[in-house]
Image: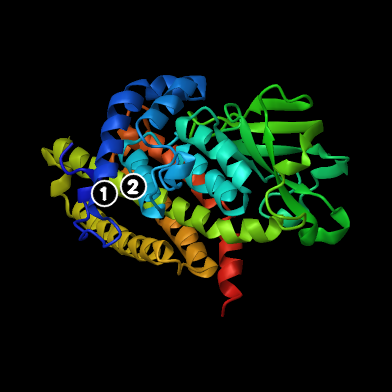
Amino acid sequence: MGLRPEEVLGVPKPDWKTDDVVMLEEMATKFLEAEVLPHYDRFEKQEMFDRSVWELAGENGLLCASMPEEYGGAGGNYAHESAILEAISHVGVDGFGIALHNSIVAPYILHYGSEEQKQKWLPKMATGELIGAIAMTEPGAGSDLQGVKTSAKRDGNHYVINGSKTFITNGQLANLIVVVTKTDPAQGAKGTSLIIVETDGQEGFERGRNLDKIGLKSNDTSELFFNDVRVPTSNLLGTEEGQGFVQLMQQLPQERLQIGGTAIAMAERAIAVTSDYVKERKAFGKAVIEFQNTQFKLAELKTEATIGRVFYNHCVERHVNGGLDPVTASMAKYWLSDLQNKVVDECLQLHGGYGYMNEYPIARMFRDARVQRIYGGTNEIMKLLIARSL
């Protein structure tokens, strides 16, 4: 490859990419290229990563980078998590579910867990002994979190959880799951609570199918079933029941920013591999890059991706400083994932027939990109949230 994906746009290094963040991104890139990329086709075929790779990622400091050192983390912030997720997209191992584990699941425990909960769970998440998932979506409740039906009823000093979840990322491997439940169904959103379920040896917990997806094949995405699952009331996140919906709303901006980060990083990789391809591929006696249409298309994509990268960097800067609002995070999620899909589609077209062949990276990117406009709240929901600010 010619230019590396992170170099293709030539955007100046933002302030949030401090020297230690850059070092982490370089280290993550080397690790992924050496320990994940050579096995990635096998992970795609088996539709799941090996658990040992998670543990190796923990040994190399790629799990819980933003968690405090006293809980086994590296003491970083979202900038460090962004470095890792961008490395994943730049290397092209997009199905590795550590970004969800790191910057979605772990923060729920850090922000809302008791000291005992943090000491119990976060160090094991940092080593990969515990793999995290969050169980929000249900067969009848997608982007509408208020429609959750999974219930958690108190029985002495335990909750009894019943319900089913679907489309759960890391669903086959996860053994620590943040479950979105209704502790008081009559209260609607105010009756929602987040409860941790440790699945190892847990009676009543079942994993359903590892779902057969269009893309991100290497990431296990599953149905989960809770049949009279008993967990201690001490597994509730927060000081009292009914705080779950507020907790979810407070953490969703980071999840949506993360989706925007993976989106712009894949767009950069798509432009990089396509630029290389059109310089090598010949048509009508000359390189495809020599045709004006090719030049104009890549000029457009580089321009739009540069705008996207500058916007993402701006959002990260605000988030690291505590100032990213939910509306701007929704803009980042919807616009950058839309842009990602546009860039990948145009780049596939520039590959011609070879772009439709699975042996070319652009084909996998085409499949993997599509879900970004759906999960984390559909882009239509993002537009509703943005419209409310007008």
Crowd tier of the residue under label 2, counting other residues whose Cα lies within 10 Å: few below 14, some 14–19, many 20 or above:
many
Where is mark 2, residue-wise?
Answer: 83
Going by the picture, which residue comes out furthest to the left?
Answer: 285
Horizontal side of 294 relative to 172 (left or right) equals left
In percent of width and height, residue 377 lies at 59, 54
Q: Earlier in the sequence, mark 2 or mark 1?
A: 1
Q: Residue at x 26, y 33 (%)?
A: 30
- Which is nearer the eye, 212 or 193? 193
> Which amino acid type is shown beneath numbered disc 2?
Ala
Q: Is residue 275 above or below residue 128?
A: below
Q: Where's residue 251, x and y in %?
A: 57, 56
Q: Name the side, left or right, on which 324 lies relative to 29.
A: right
Dividing the image into 4 quarters, which one contains the N terminus?
A: top left
Q: Would residue 215 appear left or right of 1 to someone viewing this image?
A: right
Specify whether residue 337 is in view.
no
- Check the picture and name the quadrant holding the C terminus: bottom right
Vertical placement of 207 versus 191: above or below? above
What residue type is disc 1 on?
Asp
Camera-nearest residue between 184 and 302: 184
**Is any part of residue 258 visible from this angle?**
yes
The residue that mark 1 highlights is 20
Determine the residue positioned at 53% across, 69% down: 327
Which image quadrant for residue 309?
Answer: bottom left
Q: Which is nearer the eye, 184 or 89?
A: 184
Mark 1 Cα-neighbour bin, 10 Å: few <14, some 14–19, many ≥20: few
Q: Nearer the viewer, mark 2 or mark 1?
A: 1
How many marks are shown on the rendered structure?
A: 2
Q: What kind of element bears circle 1?
A: helix
Q: CA distance from mark 2 to mark 1?
A: 10 Å
